[in-house]
Amino acid sequence: MCTTNLCIAFYILTFCVVGWFGALSLILIKSSREQGNTYVLDPLACWVNSEVVNPLNCFRSEVLVPLRNRLDLFARDFTREWNNHIDSKTDVGRAF
């Protein structure tokens, strides 16, 4: 038996995960026998949609898309200024 804190934490985490899966499986078995899957699966799907999927979509539309647009705009302005600066210092663009 391992006595380090990491091993003890691993055993406790394993016990908790197995316990949650066991409890969920017992609830699913009981609900499927009594009322069908609408007792557990539909509210669980609704919860996953409202607590996980919708915030991810909101984060993408409110944070990631504007950030990507601003970075694209910054990259375009930076390359334009860089090209203007380099072209004004060298005669490479005017050689032909």
Image (spheres, grey):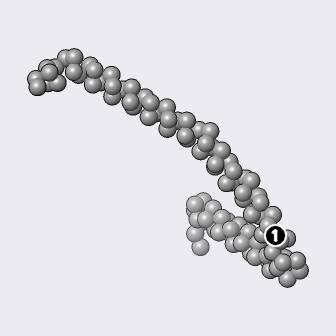
Tell me which residue sits at (43%, 29%) in the image.
74
**Element type at mark 1:** loop
Rendered location of residue 53, percent (x, y) = 67, 54
Residues packed near mark 1 inside 10 Å, few (<14), some (14 to 19) or many (20 plus): some
> Mark 1 belongs to which amino acid?
Val
To which quarter of the image does residue 83 belong? top left
The residue lying toward the viewer, choosing from 88 and 51, is 88
Q: Nearer the viewer, residue 37 or 1?
A: 37
**Residue 29 in view:** yes
Determine the residue positioned at 58% across, 60% down: 6
Residue 92 in the image, given as x and y percentages of width and height: 14, 24
Horizontal side, residue 93 vs residue 20: left or right: left
Q: Is residue 12 above or below residue 50?
A: below
From where the camera sits, is residue 19 visible?
Answer: no
- The answer to whether residue 48 is above or below residue 19 is above
Seen as rendered, the residue at the extreme left is 95
Q: Residue furthest bottom?
A: 33
- Residue at the extreme top of the image, as rendered: 88
Q: Quadrant of residue 20?
A: bottom right
Q: At 39% from the left edge and 26% from the top edge, which residue is drawn?
A: 77
- Using the image as rendered, state which of residue 3 and residue 34 is in the foreground: 34
